[in-house]
Image (cartoon, rainbow, N blue to C red):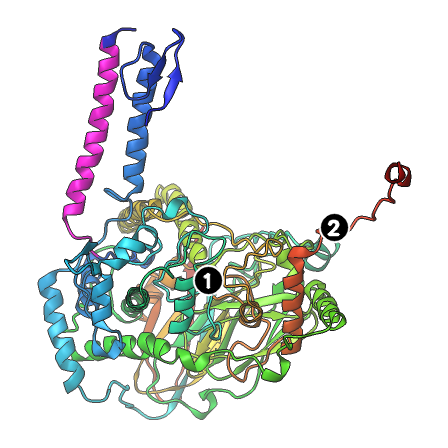
């Protein structure tokens, strides 16, 4: 099966054999080689993705032995935190931005201009909102990782939480709820939205008609806030943090927060998160001396033990380098 | 030009081809290993010690591509998995082995990452099984598919994509492949669960490489928690899938025989919903139904890659900022800032290396509803399910309740009306210009 080419001398030259016109021959050989190379590189030889660790057979077989045996022998879990200590305590404080407050760009509104940018006024993004008068950082989520005891006031709520959207912006940019609570997803716009919650444990994607409210019951706890999008208006973004108990806070415009009635007398590990933080999964990592005194680690967590009825005040100045961009 | 030049060209070409082939033969003599999802590894800056520990636990729980293994808790049938796994060959009775590599791996990849050698040139990309998300299924949006759902995809293929039908294979071979797809999904989900477990619970420092151990042999608490990830978080969702099948209300299903006017009324109602703000189909599928509305969003798989790429760009920008502010520092502050900067450079290099191997993100293009080709099947029930639950892993939202007992947006009657309209769309002109009156003279003459 040869492909014949017309040569200038009038003869036909099968590709891959000697040919009177050198330039044809040369180029076809190069083409063949190139195609061959391209094919083989596509075929995964020395593939782009073949790196990273490979299991060690001996270590793996040791683990397997333990897993197979353990499945029969192991009893029920006893990993619940032992509840030590009595009484309750409060932690409150403020987060300030150390640097020039960043200017928020307008959202990239590409649809439904009349509703989403009324009068040509495009809403600003909220990736890092710093109040210029107080230097407070808005929308930092602070939450207890595990609780040995939970005060009555921090038990999972049964009331519905409003999650509204207007001018194609989610009105609660960072929203914390307890598992089992109902989120009333409202659409205050005159165009249809859909709300797409893409958590590691909670997923939801439903049409929210103009002017209507759809109830969504939050299913499971998340370790970090889950992104919430609208597929129709892809610039829309918010974060939903479902937790087992209400030991959480989201900083207000002036950067202030308060978590009340925390269990006193036990080691508390508190996660600090911000959507633009450079740490893994949005962990806010601060390495200043004041942060270090709180045991702030590279997962964006502080470790403290509170005395009964103590009100712990903390004030943290977060350097600009803790955020992306 | 002379003959000599020619010979040289041939020689070069031959050498190039030889080098390429030689490289491959060598690579193929080693059995292919399972690889970690390096995008997740890199995004979380896992230290080498944890990467190796995760690879070892994965091997202990799931074996290798040639020697699969499963714990009884998974409920997977090892006999079927062995039929599907390993290299491709036939024994003297004609029984085929290595079915996954024979039929699937070239697109879906050894690990099921949707990253086989042909993946890059296919559109849509082959499914990455590792998140356990499948688009065409009968269950509620967040739930895993049933065996019947996966079987339907294997039997029918996915129209309009590169996924063919495997209905010509003997039933036991199809069953083996189905089991293997579930195996790769559970394996991928477990890997992600393990990575998240390390990120959430184990201390490590990506700058120094120091880390607390992930050692489930010697730490019984860790072992228990890791087993709970497998049993409670991964396997349970597959086992309960059949309890989460969406069953349409019998009373709302349109009868097979409807009068022309009944059908027309339903199509008209469906059309109004399509264009209205309640169902809102028009926003994405476009005023003509050609799928040319909203096209800027991504599916979950592309979104993850996009995020990885965006974060890499942000890291690059922050390196630039850090570098310029380095000059203002001195003493200890300078030293620590310099060390941080060096760590960021290392992270950037690793991220860029990983990014090179990823499939470039593509926008999720809404289905063209006019070519009468529906990927999840074109039966009314298939279309009903797509509208009722949306399509998992994509921007397509649900019209119905997304969990048993939850609040839906549309009634079942409305969803069936949309089904009727969607089914009529391929046969409706894209526009309906006024007909020109016939040239009666020409007709008469």
- Residue at 26 percent of width and 6 percent of height: B2
Which of the labelled discs sits on residue B431, or is there none? 2
Whether B12 is among the magenta residues is: yes
Chain letter behind tag 2: B
Is A188 left or right of B166, judged from the image as shown? right
Q: Which residue in the protein does label 1 denote?
A: A275
Residue A267, located in which quarter of the rendered image? bottom left
**In which quadrant will I find the N terminus of chain B?**
top left
The answer to whether any part of residue A163 appears in the image is: yes
Cα–Cα gap, marks 1 and 2:
46 Å
Magenta residues span: B4-33
State the image coordinates of residue A180 (x, y, percent, origin top left).
48, 84
Locate residue B219, reporting x and y percent.
Answer: 15, 76
Q: What predominant SS class does the magenta segment belong to?
A: helix
Q: Nearer the viewer, residue B13 or A278?
A: B13
Is the residue A251 above or below the residue B73 in the image?
above
């Amino acid at each position: 099966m040869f492909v014949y080419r017309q040569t200038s001398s009038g003869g036909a030259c099968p590709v891959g054999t000697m040919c009177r016109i050198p330039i044809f021959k040369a180029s076809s050989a190069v083409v063949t080689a190139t195609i061959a190379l391209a094919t083989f590189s596509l075929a995964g030889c020395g593939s782009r993705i073949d790196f990273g660790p490979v299991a060690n057979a001996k270590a793996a077989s040791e683990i397997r032995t333990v897993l197979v045996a353990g499945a029969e022998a192991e009893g029920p879990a006893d990993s619940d935190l032992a509840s030590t200590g009595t009484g309750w305590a409060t932690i409150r404080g403020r987060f300030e931005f150390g640097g020039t407050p960043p200017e928020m760009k307008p959202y990239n509104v590409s649809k439904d201009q009349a509703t989403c940018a009324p009068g040509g006024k495009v809403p600003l993004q909220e990736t890092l909102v710093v109040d210029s008068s107080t230097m407070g950082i808005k929308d930092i989520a602070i939450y207890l990782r595990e609780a040995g005891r939970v005060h009555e006031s921090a038990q999972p709520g049964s009331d519905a939480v409003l999650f509204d959207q207007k001018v194609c912006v989610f009105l609660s940019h960072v929203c914390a709820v307890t598992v089992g609570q109902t989120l009333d997803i409202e659409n205050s716009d005159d165009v249809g939205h859909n709300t797409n919650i893409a958590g590691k444990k909670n997923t939801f994607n439903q049409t929210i008609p103009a002017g209507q409210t759809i109830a969504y019951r939050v299913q499971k706890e998340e370790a970090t806030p889950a992104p919430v999008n609208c597929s129709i208006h892809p610039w829309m973004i918010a974060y939903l943090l479902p937790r087992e108990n209400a030991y959480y806070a989201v900083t207000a415009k002036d950067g202030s927060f308060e978590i009340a009635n925390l269990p006193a007398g036990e080691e508390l590990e508190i996660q600090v998160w911000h959507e633009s933080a450079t740490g893994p999964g949005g962990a806010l990592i601060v390495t200043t001396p004041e942060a270090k005194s709180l045991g702030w680690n590279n997962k964006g967590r502080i470790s403290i033990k509170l005395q009964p009825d103590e009100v712990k005040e903390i004030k943290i100045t977060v350097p600009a380098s803790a955020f992306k961009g | 030009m002379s003959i000599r030049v020619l010979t040289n060209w041939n020689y070069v070409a031959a050498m190039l081809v030889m080098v390429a082939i030689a490289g491959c033969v060598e690579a193929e003599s080693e059995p292919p290993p399972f690889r970690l999802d390096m995008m997740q590894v890199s995004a979380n800056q896992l230290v080498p010690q944890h990467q190796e520990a995760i690879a070892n636990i994965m091997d202990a729980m799931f074996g290798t591509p040639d020697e699969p293994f499963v714990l009884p808790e998974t409920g997977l049938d090892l006999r079927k998995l062995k039929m599907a796994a390993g290299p491709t060959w036939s024994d003297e009775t004609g029984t085929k082995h290595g079915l996954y590599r024979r039929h699937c791996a070239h697109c879906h990849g050894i690990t099921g990452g949707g990253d086989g050698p042909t993946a890059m040139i296919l559109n849509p990309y082959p499914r990455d099984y590792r998140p356990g998300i499948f688009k065409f299924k009968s269950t509620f949006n967040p739930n895993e598919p049933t065996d019947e759902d996966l079987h339907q995809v294997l039997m029918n293929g996915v129209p309009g994509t590169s996924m063919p039908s495997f209905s010509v294979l003997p039933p036991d071979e199809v069953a083996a492949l189905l089991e293997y797809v579930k195996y790769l999904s559970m394996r991928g989900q477990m890997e992600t669960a393990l990575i998240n477990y390390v990120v959430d619970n184990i201390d490590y420092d990506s700058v120094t490489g120091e880390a607390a151990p992930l050692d489930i042999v010697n730490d019984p608490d860790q072992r228990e928690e890791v087993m709970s990830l497998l049993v409670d978080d991964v396997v349970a969702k597959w086992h309960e899938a059949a309890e989460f099948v969406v069953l349409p209300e019998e009373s709302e299903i349109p009868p097979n025989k409807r009068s022309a006017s009944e059908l027309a009324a339903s199509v008209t109602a469906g059309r109004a919903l399509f264009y209205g703000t309640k169902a809102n189909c028009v926003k994405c599928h476009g005023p003509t139904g050609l799928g040319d509305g909203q096209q800027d969003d991504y599916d979950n798989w592309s979104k993850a890659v996009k995020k990885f790429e965006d974060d890499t760009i942000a890291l690059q920008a922050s390196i630039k900022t850090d570098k310029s502010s380095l000059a203002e520092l001195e003493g200890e502050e300078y030293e620590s800032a310099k060390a941080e900067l060096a760590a960021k450079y290392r992270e950037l290099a690793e991220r860029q290396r990983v990014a090179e191997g990823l499939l470039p993100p593509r926008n999720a293009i809404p289905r063209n509803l006019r070519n009468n080709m529906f990927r999840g099947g074109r039966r009314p029930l298939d279309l009903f399910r797509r509208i009722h639950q949306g399509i998992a892993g994509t921007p397509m939202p649900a019209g119905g309740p997304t969990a048993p007992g939850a609040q839906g947006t549309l009634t079942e009657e409305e969803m069936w009306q949309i089904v009727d309209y969607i089914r009529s769309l391929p046969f409706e002109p894209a526009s309906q210009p006024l007909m020109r009156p016939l040239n009666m003279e020409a007709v008469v003459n």
